[in-house]
Amino acid sequence: MISQTKLYAALVAFPAITLTMNAHAIDIQDGKALTVSTQTNATPAAKPSSADAALVSDAADDANALEPRTNAAEPPSIEPKSPVCSPVALAVGIEHFSYDEAFAEDLVWSGYGDKRHENKLIHKDVKQPLQDLVKAAAKDKVALYPSSMFRSVRAQDAIVKRKVRQKQSPKTIYHTSSPAGFSEHHTGYAVDFAPINANFAKTKGYQWLVNNAEKYGWQQTFTPEFSAQTGVSEESWHWRYVGDERGQALFAPRSCQTEEVLESELSD
Ligand SMILES: [Zn+2]
């Protein structure tokens, strides 16, 4: 089997290939032919439960949906994923890292907003940490409004497709949006606080998070430093949970820059 680094290098060398979530097998022959197997599951995915079906998706306009992930066919993994970056974003100089969608059965209502909306769901292991964070802020008389938590690959796909229809350039799109399969929101471990725009940086809530979030296991993803490295726009409102083993693994530093960087990270 090839190393992750070689695989990554091959992916960078062939940016035109299409990566699909849950790709289980990738074959490289003589460094030339590159085939990505896109089989999603060895066994048919379980049908969504009626509760899932009741979810109102932001992506209702996108009928060609991926099925929700289910762990019927494979156990949950907290292993760091191979450092695969989005080829379409990399082609315009922007780094977006891949994330698996949370299993449907691991998603619960966050406790905030309308539970019928997909984006009000959160990974079950993050529900309490988010509530603890909000309560701690409230104790300091600071209001935090969790607004958007889980987002399916399907919903992200609809967002990107809408921007494509609006004739936005790939560079513009991937500066502010992740390609489907490359959003931290897929994991159920990320939250956007309202207002979801640049004004959030001016709120007491943001200042409180900057000073206190780390104590509760939360961190801002799209900081000025991260933006400088990846080309993704700054987002004061987007925070992720790194307070447990899975969060640590999901958000371990990754880079699309050089093989050397990757090798040093992989050997840690
Ligand atoms: Zn976000």
Image: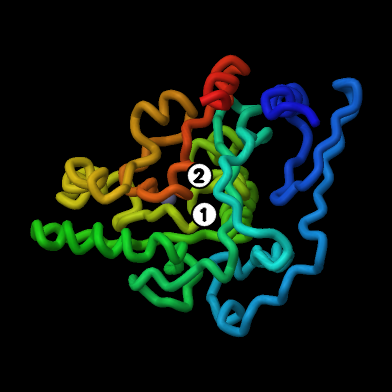
Residue at the spot 49% in from the left edge and 42% down from the top edge = 249
Q: Position of residue 21 (x, y in %)?
A: 70, 50
Q: Residue at x 25, y 61 (%)?
A: 132
Q: Quadrant of residue 186?
A: bottom right
Residue furthest out toward the top: 260
Up-down: is 27 above or below 247? above
Amino acid under disc 1: Thr
Q: Position of residue 38 (x, y in %)?
A: 81, 49
| Residue 203 relative to residue 22: left or right | left
Q: Which residue is mark 1?
A: 187
Disc 1: CA contacts within 10 A as few (<14), some (14-19) or many (>=20)? many
Neighbourhood count class around disc 2 (C-alpha, 10 Å): few under 14, some 14–19, many 20 upward: many
Give the CA separation, mark 1 to mark 2: 8 Å
Q: Position of residue 267 (x, y in %)?
A: 56, 24
Left or right, 39 with respect to 67, comes to right
Question: Could you say which disc has been placed on residue 250 in the image?
Answer: 2
